[in-house]
Amino acid sequence: MNNNLSASDAALQPKTRRLSQPNKPVVTLLSLVVPFYNEEETITHFFNHVIPELEAISEIKFEIVCINDGSTDSTLQQLKDFAINDFRVRVIDLTRNFGKEAALSAGLDESFGDIIVPFDADLQDPVEVIIKLVEKWREGYQIVLARRIDRNADSALKRWTAAKFYQLHNSLSEIKIPENVGDFRLITREVADSLKRLPETQRFMKGLFAWVGYDTATIDYARKPRIAGSSKFSGWKLWNFALEGFTSFSTLPLRIWTYLGAMVAAAALLRGFYLMFRTIFFGIDVPGYASLSTAILMLGGIQLIGIGVLGEYIGRIYVESKNRPVYLIRNRYEKKEEDV
């Protein structure tokens, strides 16, 4: 813990998980895991909406695990202000921006709950849906997915690209990702512990959630517009995110180039036989260079694309071989329950 903390920060002490006292009924603890990155405009709205809804769920205690993913605005200070006034709010401050997948992994690792709900700070996923997830979990399911049946809050381009991503990913990979299902879901402690055992440092959480299996149910909901601020995912980031998904759960892109190479080689062999027989029976003509240059450029382009696909996988091997941690934590801020 930093020795130069302010007076308000000093009241926020690291917390270890306390075991239930004997002869007391065990109450289910729900952990709401929320990554924050430059969300200063949404924080007050977020807590004002979320806390009353969680308090309304019967027989449930809750904690809100806020992951500050290297924010450069006032996000961290606002989160600390809420944490010092409410022991149910815990703040995990990462040393820099590691990305949403790493921040979500940090939240799962740091949560104490018997059930865990990853959630976004922008409130596009309605908080009132959480009670429906809990009700479904009480029926015995270990994972309850929240599926978006109405995405009119998103742009037409985003809806189209999202649909194509799910279709392409599921056609390439043996691990099928449920369509229109994001990180918003409920998982049990058993599922969270299974996710912790997965060693990869480049994490595509939607795929990892699907990979672990377990008994799964689905509920439907309509997505809302952002409550404030703007999305931090640019088109370029979404494209790289999609590539991460393809290369994390399928080697089919590599095999495609094997098949394509075999087809090009077969076509070249057939053309070679054709030219040989044409020369034998009709003599030699003087062809132009247009077709030759086109063929060379086309084959060169195919080879470069194939090398690029190969490079994506080699790059993943290179990153994973370093065995670096997924994230680093600078500090933890929370108020002890007994201080209330």
Image (tube, rainbow, N blue to C red):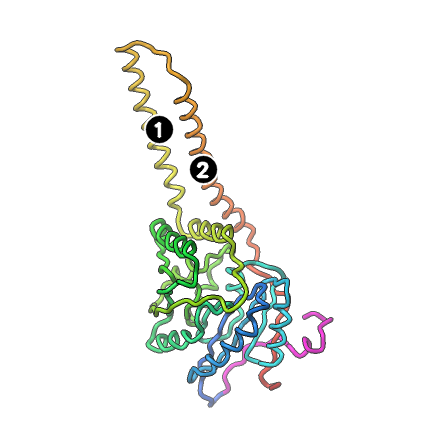
Looking at this view, is 250 or 100 the one in front? 100
Residue at 60 percent of width and 72 percent of height: 79
Q: Is residue 18 magenta?
A: yes
**In this image, 18 relative to 209: left or right?**
right
Q: Which residue is mark 1?
A: 265
- The span picked out in magenta is 1-21
Q: Between tags 1 and 2, which lies in front?
A: 2
Quadrant location, the N terminus: bottom right
Q: Which residue is mark 2?
A: 305
Nearer to us in this view, 103 or 120? 120
> Of callouts 1 and 2, which one flags the residue occurring earlier in the amino acid sequence?
1
124 or 206, which is in the foreground?
A: 124
Q: Is residue 110 above or below residue 335?
A: above
Q: Is residue 47 above or below residue 285?
A: below
* Residue 81 visible in the shown view: yes
Looking at this rendering, what residue extends furthest in the left direction? 281
Report if residue 193 is visible in the image. Answer: no
Circle 2 sits in a helix, a strand or a loop, which is it?
helix
- In the rendered image, residue 100, in percent from the top left (x then y), is placed at 52, 60
Asked whether, in this view, residue 197 is left or right of residue 6, the answer is left
Q: Position of residue 288 (x, y in %)?
A: 40, 17
Q: How many numbered markers are drawn?
A: 2
